[in-house]
Amino acid sequence: MNGHAAAQAFAEVTTLDPQHVDAWVMRARLAAALDGPDAARQLLEQAVAANPGDLGLSTLLAELGGPAPDLTPPR
């Protein structure tokens, strides 16, 4: 498998549909494998900005040293 080609394909998906959480997760996993945790963290920050209520993305970001997810219920 060509990891860079796969990363580009998932990048295109998230450009077309920023709410496609699974594509963000795959982008982050590929970035971590290809470019290291800092690259994955940057992608996950973008993913959380595009999907602020997604606990899965927030948790992945926290696992890479980002802020802990906000578990406060909405008002």
Image (spheres, grey):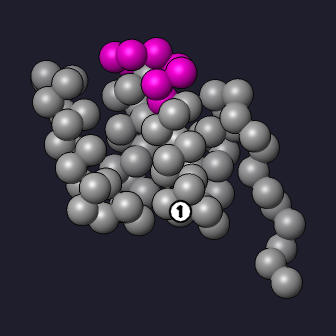
Per the image, label 1 sits on a secondary structure element best described as loop
Tell me if residue 39 is in the magenta stretch: yes
In this view, 22 is above or below 51: above
Image coordinates of residue 27 in percent, x first then y, are 35, 38
Quadrant assignment, res 5: top left
In this rendering, position of residue 37 left or right of residue 23 = right
Q: Residue at x 52, y 41 (%)?
A: 44
Q: Is residue 65 left or right of residue 16?
A: right
The image shows residue 9 at horizontal and vertical percentages of 17, 43
Residue sitting at x 36%, y 40%: 26
> Badge 1: few (under 14), some or many (20 or more) residues near its Cα, within 10 Å?
some
Magenta region: which residues? 33-40
Tell me the residue at 66%/45% (across/down): 59
**Residue drawn 79% across and 57% down?**
70
Q: Position of residue 52 (x, y in %)?
A: 61, 62
Q: Is residue 5 above or below residue 38?
A: below
Amino acid type for the residue under numbered disc 1: Asn
Q: Residue furthest bottom?
A: 75
Q: Quadrant of the N terminus?
A: top left
Q: Residue 34's image quarter?
A: top left
Residue 31 occupies which quadrant of the picture? top left
Residue 67 lies in the magenta stretch: no
The answer to which of 59 and 18 lies nearer the viewer is 18
Q: Position of residue 49 (x, y in %)?
A: 56, 56
Main SS class of the magenta portion in the image: helix
Image quadrant where one finds the C terminus: bottom right
Q: Which residue is mark 1?
A: 51
